[in-house]
Image: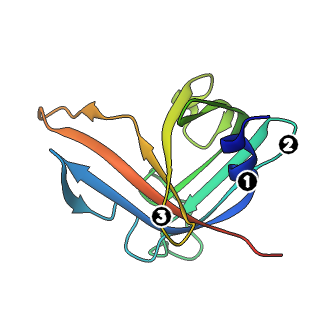
């Protein structure tokens, strides 16, 4: 087992989710107080749950900007982790592989950076998610 894989195993809680456009901070897509959990188990299964705190009681979330949950298999290669989705709250993502670059803050929190993409308006965009290890 790789040292990096061993380091990411376990449960993590979301600290922040930040979106960048053309390399500069743009916004918090689920709000500054978004919450979430990310779990990697030793068998290669994972699940992720992210949620805005701005939800309305009694109404199901209607878009990914307020709620995202998925599960699947995970692998580490080099400095990246891949999530191969077999279930997702956004059905278009089922069967896709999401690749994240892994790094760690000086405090030991894990930062996952999404692959960059170009938006419909021609802007380069990526997200940075900071996770802190759950202490049981």
Q: Residue at x 44, y 51 (%)?
A: 63
Please give left or right for residue 21 compared with residue 72 in the image: left
Instruction: Point out residue 99 in the picture as x, y percentages from the top left corner.
Output: 51, 32
Q: How many marks?
A: 3
Label 1: element kind: strand
Pointer 3 or 1: first along the chain: 1
* Label 2 sits on residue: 42
37 over 120 or under it: above or below: below
Q: Which residue is mark 3?
A: 105
Where is residue 55? Give x, y as percent: 49, 72
Give coordinates of residue 86: x percent, y percent: 71, 29
Secondary element type, mark 3:
loop
Q: Which mark is residue 39?
A: 1
* Disc 2 secondary structure class: loop
Residue depth check, mark 3 versus mark 1: number of the one nearer the observer: 3
Query: Cβ–Cβ below 8 Å for labels 3 and 1?
Result: no
Q: Quadrant of the N terminus?
A: top right
Q: Is residue 132 above or below residue 95?
A: below
């Amino acid at each position: 087992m790789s040292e990096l894989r061993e380091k990411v195993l376990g449960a993590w809680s979301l600290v922040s989710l930040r979106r960048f456009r053309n390399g500069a901070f743009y916004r918090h897509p689920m709000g500054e107080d978004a919450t979430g959990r990310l779990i990697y188990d030793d068998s290669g299964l994972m699940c992720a749950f992210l949620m805005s705190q701005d939800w309305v009681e009694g109404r199901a979330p209607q878009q990914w900007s307020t709620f995202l949950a998925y599960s699947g298999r995970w692998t580490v290669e080099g400095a990246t982790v891949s999530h191969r989705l077999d279930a997702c709250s956004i059905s278009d993502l089922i069967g896709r592989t999401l690749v994240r670059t892994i790094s760690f803050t000086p405090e030991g929190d894990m930062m996952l950076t999404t692959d960059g993409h170009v938006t419909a308006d021609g802007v380069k965009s990526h997200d940075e998610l900071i996770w802190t290890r759950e202490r049981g």
